[in-house]
Amino acid sequence: MNIPDTIKVGALTYNIIIVDGFDDDKDGEHNPLQLKITIRKGKQEAMENTFWHEVVHAFNSETKSEEYVQALANSFQLFIKDNPGVFK
């Protein structure tokens, strides 16, 4: 999977930024005010999972538990990996 430079969620377009690291231990960040998703550079599969985690936050920016968001991100990532023809 290629992580795009931008994604559109509803009427909003988010920029996707890959960084070497954060000041703390996080792997990614969803910033709805700046319309930005930031992902820490790492192994491709980990970056893809972080991408989906932050996209789930963008789908619904209301407070949800991180466990809930991570479960959805894992499901999206596996679904796309296991069903590559779905989006062609």
Image (cartoon, rainbow, N blue to C red):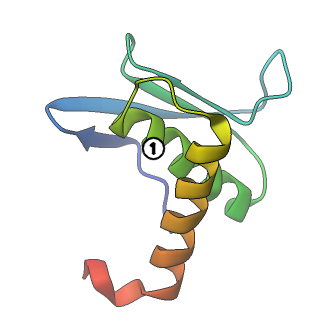
Q: Which residue is mark 1?
A: 56
Q: Is residue 65 left or right of residue 83?
A: right
Classify 33 as above or below 30. Answer: above
Provide residue 39's location: percent of width, then percent of height.
Answer: 63, 37
Classify 57 as above or below 88. Answer: above
What is the quadrant of residue 69 in the picture? top right
Give the crowd class for mark 1: few <14, some 14-19, many >=20 residues within 10 Å.
many
Q: Is residue 21 left or right of residue 57?
A: right
Identify which residue is drawn at 52% across, 86% down: 82
- The residue closer to the viewer here, 41 or 61, is 61
Tag 1 secondary structure: helix
In the picture as drawn, the residue positioned furthest to the left comes out as 11
What amino acid is found at the position of numbered circle 1 in the picture?
Answer: Val
Provide residue 71's location: percent of width, then percent of height.
Answer: 61, 56
Provide residue 55's location: percent of width, then percent of height.
Answer: 44, 43
User: Total of numbered circles in the picture?
Assistant: 1
Identify which residue is drawn at 45% across, 44% down: 56
- The residue closer to the viewer here, 1 or 68, is 68
Q: Quadrant for the C terminus, please.
A: bottom left
Provide residue 64's location: percent of width, then percent of height.
Answer: 53, 31
